[in-house]
Image: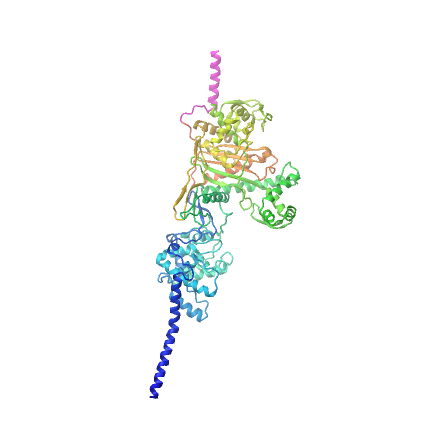
């Protein structure tokens, strides 16, 4: 009996023990199940819906794409662009899976085997090097729906949410799609989000062109973008890259022989270039485009009714810029301006007022102060309530700063006040190149360095155009029936104006007092002949003509416009001059062809405006006149120094005091305008020999066109301008002269 009671008690104890053991085991499982269930229904916070998963809200950079399909730059908060799985090389996929989740294709979003390892080795065993339990899918869930700042208790619920999101992702996407989405969301450091941006920043290439060692490095960087940065921590990055390669060997994605070769390779960072808004190509154009696109986004709405966001919505902006022409234009500007600046410094050496000419010190101080008032430093101090006198005092205190030089950024100790004057010393430029038959802008250089000099001299800047305006005056004369061979007197001339007589003089004594053919008059830029024409045909016909040719800036209706006293932009001048090369049809210069959303849907296409501004015959006659400038006038150095012997029409321009130098050059398929001058008109060369457009602006055109012609991938014709079928005017001056003699003799015979 006693034995039975003891056995019964023992049995009860055993059953009770087993029950408690089972409760200890099952309890957490049931609790976890309940927590997962409650989390899945949103009790502990909203979970992303199927629609959210289908349209993840990661910030996508808007891409600027050239006419030849090259990336020009991006607008972004996060420098991220998406790629499809098909665009990924096998090496990047193999490296990622081998390193982060080698059972990726075997699990359904959660790797319970890995979780068990974490539980046993990391939590109970205290081995922090045993690896994590997160799958690529879970990491994607975390990247797509980032964690907030959470305490340890909240992290548990967040982790469960990630499991649920991972499971949903696995149900809604293929494994390959998940790989692509993951590589599109991760941060590689150096302002590169996603594999497409990383390939560009680290190796200046596209993902599909990455080599095996490059792919391994990028996968290795993901563990810690700063810690394993090859730029900051080369040795760590090398060790990490080789670890990734060894994992690829372990999981049969790479042979041992390949590994032995690859691990010995150094990390090549020669092509590394962190992207930024004020570096790279076409920086002035990109900033102009940013302003234009910001306005577009304000006027255009997405299907959900909100405005497009230039920095988040992943727009694709297809531009007319030719990336190769843009490179050649920037190279030409740098090559010439670097040398011209040396001449400018030498020209002004030893002059106390440099680079300002013939103005008092009070005026110089006013120029510097106005520039100070436009600076960010001034605005910050003003907003903080600092007075004018105190601001000026602070601006005159030397500090360490970076300044621009043609050899690169230089760190110096200088007062902000002195730095303003220093940067006023630099000659600036504006260049725009247009295809006249389409109006497409192929190259745009708005200055010498957008980081230091942000003002754009193509579209925003307007300066006196000088003699480059004369072809418009001559165009009116051609329209009235004159020939390039018509002779006019090169004699003193006065035109009565409300303010008194206006009597322009010539800059040289060439053909003084003689009859001169119009072609020679334009070639040598004879002022008195231009005045003669404006007196003959009037100011208003010239203004009406240039209005039809796209010039919208104010023009004072005074005779002096024939010498180019009007302020116009490079953009306006190139657009108008292009009309001559396009047989009299003005096409508004255009910089965008279309805008697409992130999915490739066309949001808007752009068609340039057209206007028949003048007859084909008039346009051709002006081209013949402008050819004389290159053949024997102020632009002959294009033939000798630059070896450009193909048909070219052109016009140089130099304004009063040599403040502005211009050159407009036309070929049948490309019209390019160049301006050179300082930011302030009071800063300039003191001699016309150095300050004239033929010396400051024309060389940029010559260098640019040489590079364009030498580039076999561009294929710009060296042919002649097309002659109208029924040209009713004699353009051969010898023939014209003989006919004139015969007409005179005939008149005498009749008499």
Q: Is residue 743 above or below residue 189?
A: above
Residue 749 in percent (x, y) is at 47, 12
Q: Residue furthest front?
A: 43
Residue lying at 49% horizontally and 16% vertically, measured from the top left:
744
Magenta-highlighted residues: 725-751
- Spot occupied by residue 183 in the image (x, y as percentages of width and height): 42, 55
Task: Point out residue 251 in the picture as x, y percentages from the top left corner.
Answer: 38, 63
Residue found at x 43% / y 40%: 714
Q: Give the colour scheme shown.
A: rainbow
Chief secondary structure of the magenta portion: helix
User: How many numbered marks are there?
Assistant: 0
Asked whether residue 6 appears in the rendered view, the answer is: yes
Compared with 166, 499 (above or below) is above
Which quarter of the figure has residue 585?
top left
Frontmost residue, 352 versus 388: 388
Give the camera-side residue of 493 and 329.
493
Task: Locate the N terminus and report the quarter of the image it occupies.
Answer: bottom left
Question: Within the magenta stretch, is there residue 727?
Answer: yes
Residue 82 lies in the magenta stretch: no
Residue reaching furthest top?
751
Q: Nearer the viewer, residue 206 or 256?
A: 206
The answer, for residue 256, to whether it is visible in the render is no
Which residue is drawn at the image coordinates 48% and 64% (left, top)?
151
Instruction: Return the x and y of residue 380 as percentages of the image width and height.
Output: 59, 49
């Amino acid at each position: 009996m006693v034995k039975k009671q003891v056995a019964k008690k023992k049995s009860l104890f055993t059953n009770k023990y087993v029950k408690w053991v089972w409760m200890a085991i099952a309890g957490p499982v049931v609790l976890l199940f309940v927590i997962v269930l409650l989390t899945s229904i949103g009790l502990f916070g909203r979970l992303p819906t199927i629609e959210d998963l289908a349209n993840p809200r990661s910030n996508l950079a808007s891409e600027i794409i050239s006419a030849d399909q090259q990336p020009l730059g991006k607008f972004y908060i996060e420098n991220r662009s998406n790629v499809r799985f098909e665009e990924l090389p096998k090496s990047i996929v193999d490296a990622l899976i081998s390193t982060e989740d080698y059972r990726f294709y075997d699990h359904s979003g959660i790797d319970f085997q890995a979780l068990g390892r974490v539980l046993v080795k990391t939590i109970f065993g205290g081995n922090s090097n045993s690896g994590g339990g997160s799958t690529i899918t879970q990491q994607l869930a975390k990247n797509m729906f980032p964690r907030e700042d959470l305490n340890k208790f909240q992290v548990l619920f967040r982790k469960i949410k990630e499991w649920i999101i991972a499971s949903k992702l696995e149900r809604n996407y293929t494994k390959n799609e998940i790989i692509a989405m993951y590589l599109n969301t991760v941060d590689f450091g150096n302002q590169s989000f996603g594999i497409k941006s990383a390939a560009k920043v680290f190796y200046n290439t596209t993902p599909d062109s990455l080599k095996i060692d490059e792919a391994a490095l990028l996968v290795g960087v993901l563990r810690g973008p700063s810690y394993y940065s090859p730029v900051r921590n080369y040795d760590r990055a090398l060790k990490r890259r080789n670890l990734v390669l060894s994992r690829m060997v372990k999981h049969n994605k790479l042979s041992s022989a390949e590994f032995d070769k690859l691990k010995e390779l150094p990390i090549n960072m020669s092509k590394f270039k962190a992207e930024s808004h004020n570096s790279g190509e076409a920086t002035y154009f990109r900033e102009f485009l940013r302003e234009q696109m910001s306005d577009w986004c304000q006027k255009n709405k997405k299907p959900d009714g909100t405005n497009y966001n230039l920095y988040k919505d992943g727009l694709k902006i297809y531009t007319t810029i030719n990336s190769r022409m843009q490179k050649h234009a920037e190279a030409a500007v740098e090559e010439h301006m670097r040398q011209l600046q040396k001449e400018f410094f030498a020209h002004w050496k030893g002059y106390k007022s440099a680079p300002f000419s013939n103005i008092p010190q009070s005026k110089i101080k006013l120029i510097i102060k106005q520039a100070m008032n436009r600076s960010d430093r001034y605005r910050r101090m003003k907003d903080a309530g600092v007075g004018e006198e105190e601001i000026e005092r602070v601006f005159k205190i030397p500090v360490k700063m970076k300044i621009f030089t043609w050899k690169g950024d230089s760190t110096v100790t200088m007062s902000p006040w002195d730095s303003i004057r220093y940067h006023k010393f630099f000659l600036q430029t504006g260049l725009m190149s247009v295809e006249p038959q389409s109006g497409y802008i192929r190259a745009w250089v708005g200055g010498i360095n957008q980081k230091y000099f942000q003002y754009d001299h193509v579209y925003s800047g307007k300066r006196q155009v000088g003699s480059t305006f004369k072809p418009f005056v001559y165009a009116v004369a051609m329209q009235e029936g004159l020939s390039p061979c018509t002779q006019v007197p090169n004699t003193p001339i006065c035109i009565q104006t409300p303010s008194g007589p206006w009597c322009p003089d010539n800059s040289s004594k060439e053909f003084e007092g003689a009859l001169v053919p119009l072609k020679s008059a334009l070639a040598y830029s004879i002022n008195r002949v231009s005045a003669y024409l404006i007196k003959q045909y009037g100011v208003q016909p010239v203004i009406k003509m240039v209005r039809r040719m796209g010039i919208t800036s104010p023009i004072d209706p005074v005779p002096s416009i024939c010498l180019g006293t009007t302020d116009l932009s490079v953009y306006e001048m190139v657009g108008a001059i292009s009309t001559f090369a396009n047989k009299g049809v003005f096409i508004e210069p255009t910089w965008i062809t279309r805008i697409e959303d992130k999915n490739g849907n066309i949001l808007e296409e752009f068609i340039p405006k057209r206007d028949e501004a003048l007859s084909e015959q008039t346009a051709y006659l002006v081209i013949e006149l402008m050819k004389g400038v290159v053949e024997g006038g102020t632009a002959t150095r294009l033939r000798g120094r630059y070896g450009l012997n193909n048909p070219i029409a052109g016009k140089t321009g130099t304004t009063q005091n040599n403040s502005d130098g211009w050159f407009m050059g036309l070929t049948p398929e490309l019209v390019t305008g160049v301006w050179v001058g300082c930011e302030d008109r009071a800063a300039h060369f003191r001699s016309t020999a150095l300050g004239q457009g033929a010396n400051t602006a024309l060389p940029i055109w010559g260098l640019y066109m040489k590079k364009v012609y030498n580039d076999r991938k561009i294929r710009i014709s060296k042919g002649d301008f097309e002659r109208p079928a029924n040209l009713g005017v004699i353009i051969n001056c010898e023939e014209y002269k003989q006919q004139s003699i015969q007409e005179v003799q005939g008149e005498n015979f009749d008499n």
